[in-house]
Image (cartoon, rainbow, N blue to C red):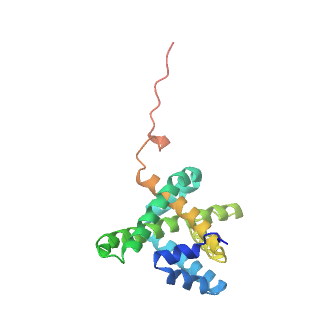
Amino acid sequence: MIAAPTLDSVAAISGHGEAFETYRSLEPLVRMGAQFVGTLVIAMAVLGLLQGFGTRAVTKSRQSPVISLCIGLPGLLIVGGIASTGMFISDTSVGPFFAIPMVIFGATVLPVVLAVGFTAIGRTVASRLGSDRLWVGVLVGAIVSGLASLALPATVAVAGVAGALGLGATVRILSGGIGAGRPDERTVPPANKI
């Protein structure tokens, strides 16, 4: 019989299956704690270093999540593809020359957008529970990330949505001068006098 393709086969092809197997071999509570702490520390670092940009990106992704997802999902696939291609070609003869910038690009962009996305998700959940502060969003987003680590498909799904939200909002903030984004800068045409 032919079995359905699994995620194990993808990890084996890439040549970097050891980290994936190590992650899967951890106890669920250890995985949950590690992912919670990792998300919390990275989100605090990103939002602490990029104070104005980070809070604007979280707000932008909360104001229009569908637009952020539509922009961020293809972008996330491109950034993830560039980073994984860099890891894949690093074992070839010309690999290090091309792989190092690709992996650095992915390792720089992905944690930032995941931190913004998990904070936006956490802040949305926290606002439903009555608190709409940034630090509560960071904490709730880290809890969501930790809870998602109990099952690998949930981790992939939640991290994909958070990454797409974060990347879409980040791209929208970086290209923010396009269009009439600020209502206070709009000019009102004079009224027609009859």
Determine the residue positioned at 66% across, 78% down: 150
In this image, 121 relative to 56: left or right?
right
Residue 129 in sight in this render: yes
* Nearer to us in this view, 114 or 186: 114
- Image vertical order of residue 151 relative to residue 67, above or below: below
Q: What percent of the width, then of the height, locates residue 103?
A: 38, 72
Percent x, y of residue 63: 57, 52
All told, the count of numbered labels is 0
On the image, the x and y values in percent for residue 146 come to 62, 76
* Residue in the image at 51% along x and 12% along y: 194
**Residue 186 spot, x, y in % from top left:** 45, 37
Is 106 situated above or below 64? below
Image quadrant where one finds the N terminus: bottom right
Hey, which residue is sitting farthest top in the picture?
Answer: 194
**Residue at position x 54%, y 51% from top?**
70
Q: Nearer the viewer, residue 23 or 88?
A: 88
In this orientation, which residue lies closer to the viewer: 31 or 9?
Answer: 9
Residue 56 in sight here: no
Q: Residue furthest front?
A: 1
Q: Residue at left 49%, top 60%?
A: 77
